[in-house]
Image: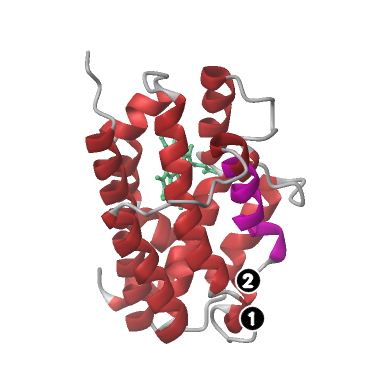
Amino acid sequence: MDSTATTATPFSTLIRTASHEQHTEAESSTFMSDMLGGRLGVEAYTRYTEQLWFVYRALEDGAGALREHPVAGPFVQPELMRTAELERDLAHLRGAGWREGLEPLPATAAYAGRVAECAREWPAGYVAHHYTRYLGDLSGGQIIRGTAEKTWGFERKGDGVRFYVFEQISNPAAFKREYRELLDAVDADDLEKQRIVDECKRAFALNTAVFRELGEVFPLSA
Ligand code: HEM
């Protein structure tokens, strides 16, 4: 894409369009398809939720220090924070001692490591990770919640699926519109925006790698 097109295209459109292929790949991964197809047991969903905990710890532990940052700061919003919800879900799924022996898969450790590195050293790159997770959770995440409730019998919007419930966001469509406005207002030159887009593709690839490893742990026997 030449720099004229980059300047003319709103950044929210640029990042969505550029990551479209990676989105399709993540969405159609074997693990996701099997999970959303109701073909996996609750242990698979639990292992997946555990991986999310490591990723959101990295996203949210790093967030506080970025609150005043000119590029990343506006994205740090308390109503998005998921760590507490994941911990409630994990207590439901694994029991009170949920934290004991909890280890990330190698792909998850790599993903969380990259998020933490961006939070520390490259706040604009952190925005790419923020977008990839939170906007996804507000979108396709709702489909995952519905399937999880149906497949494993969690109470609607209750323990087990609280991660997908944004209590403080009453109008997700409006929130996503405002989020896109924040993206469009990112104060970075075209080269830096391109780097953020590349980091977003990397974020999707890091997610896909986690799905691949989960798929190896939970292959379908049929
Ligand atoms: C099977 C799983 C998934 C389904 C069914 C799904 C579905 C969707 C849908 C329907 C939208 C469009 C919503 C809208 O335009 O308002 C969307 C957007 C999005 N999804 Fe997913 N998704 C899945 C997995 C993922 C994964 C694994 C990620 C990344 C970790 C992700 C990240 C995103 C992002 C960032 C957006 C926002 C795109 C934008 O408007 O800029 N999704 N997803």
Residue designated by label 1: 67
- In percent of width and height, residue 121 lies at 41, 86
- Seen at 33% across and 74% down, the residue is 194
Q: Quadrant of residue 146?
A: top right
Determine if residue 10 is in view.
no
Q: Earlier in the sequence, mark 2 or mark 1?
A: 1
* Residue type at tag 2: Val
Indicate how the structure is coloured in the image.
secondary structure
Residue designated by label 2: 76
Is residue 84 part of the magenta span, yes or no? yes
The relative height of residue 98 versus residue 68 in the rendered view (above or below) is above
Magenta span main SS: helix
Q: Give the range drawn in magenta.
A: 78-90
Query: How far apart are the alpha carbons under marks 2 and 1?
Result: 6 Å
- Seen at 53% across and 27% down, the residue is 148
* Residue type at tag 1: Arg
